[in-house]
Image (spheres, grey):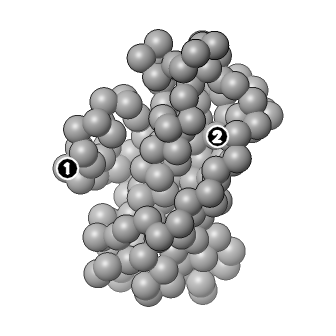
């Protein structure tokens, strides 16, 4: 992606992890906050969130549930769009497709959302989810968002 594809708000400072954490706290439903997501980094058109391991998120067999991974991917994309736009803007998920490749057992998940295109009204993202300490993806998602502001 080239930065000419990006739409950013002029004169706004870059989004910091602390600012991204505030976006999480101020704009997400309580059940999403219950996932315990933490912002590891934000950089231009990318955000990395950490989904902490929890037995509460495990399904039968001990792996983190797909529902938790999909919610984490969706949330990471909102933070990536916010980073690119210089702050939170109203948006809604139009499409998300997730492929699960391997179970995550007893490890945090790093959720890396990277914008592949950001326009005035639409954003497209590629999301990779890996168990901490591994290089092999546990899941991969793509998402499309409508920007409402």
Question: Quick one: which residue is furthest to the front in this view?
Answer: 60
Q: Residue at x 48, y 42 (%)?
A: 72
Q: Secondary structure at mark 1?
A: helix
| Residue occupying image coordinates x 62% and y 57% | 97
Q: As drawn, is 108 to the left or to the right of 14?
A: right
- The answer to whether residue 14 is visible is no
Q: Which residue is mark 2?
A: 129
Q: Residue 67: x and y, percent?
A: 50, 38
As rendered, which of 114 and 34 lies closer to the eye?
34
- Mark toward the start of the polypeptide (1 vs 2): 1
Say what secondary structure mark 2 lies in.
strand
- Name the side, left or right, on which 54 lies relative to 112: left
From what the image shows, is residue 68 above or below residue 26?
above
Does any portion of residue 144 appear in the rendered image? yes
Q: Position of residue 147 (x, y in %)?
A: 38, 77
Q: Tell me whether circle 1 and circle 2 mark residues in contact (CB < 8 Å).
A: no
Q: Is residue 55 above or below residue 5?
A: above
Whether residue 54 is situated above or below residue 128 in the rendered picture: above
- 14 vs 65, left or right, is left
Residue under numbered circle 1: 26
Nearer-the-camera pick, 8 or 24: 24
Check disc 2: other Cα within 10 Å, few if <14, some if 14-19, many if 20+.
Answer: many
| Circle 1 Cα neighbour tier, 10 Å, few/some/many (<14 / 14–19 / ≥20) | few
Image point 60% across, 47% down: which residue?
112
- Residue drawn 78% across the image and 33% down it: 135
The answer to whether residue 9 is above or below residue 96 is below
């Amino acid at each position: 992606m080239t930065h000419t594809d990006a739409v950013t708000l002029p004169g706004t400072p870059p989004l910091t992890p602390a600012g991204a954490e505030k976006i999480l706290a101020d704009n997400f439903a309580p059940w999403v906050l219950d996932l315990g997501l933490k912002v590891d980094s934000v950089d231009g058109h990318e955000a990395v969130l950490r989904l902490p391991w929890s037995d509460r998120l495990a399904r039968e067999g001990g792996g983190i549930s797909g529902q938790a991974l999909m919610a984490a991917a969706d949330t990471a994309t909102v933070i990536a769009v916010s980073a690119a736009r210089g702050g939170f803007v109203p948006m809604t998920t139009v499409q998300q497709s997730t492929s699960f490749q391997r179970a995550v057992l007893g490890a945090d998940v790093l959720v890396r959302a990277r914008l592949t295109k950001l326009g005035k009204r639409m954003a497209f993202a590629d999301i990779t989810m890996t168990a901490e300490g591994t290089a092999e993806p546990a899941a991969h998602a793509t998402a499309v968002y409508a920007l409402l502001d």
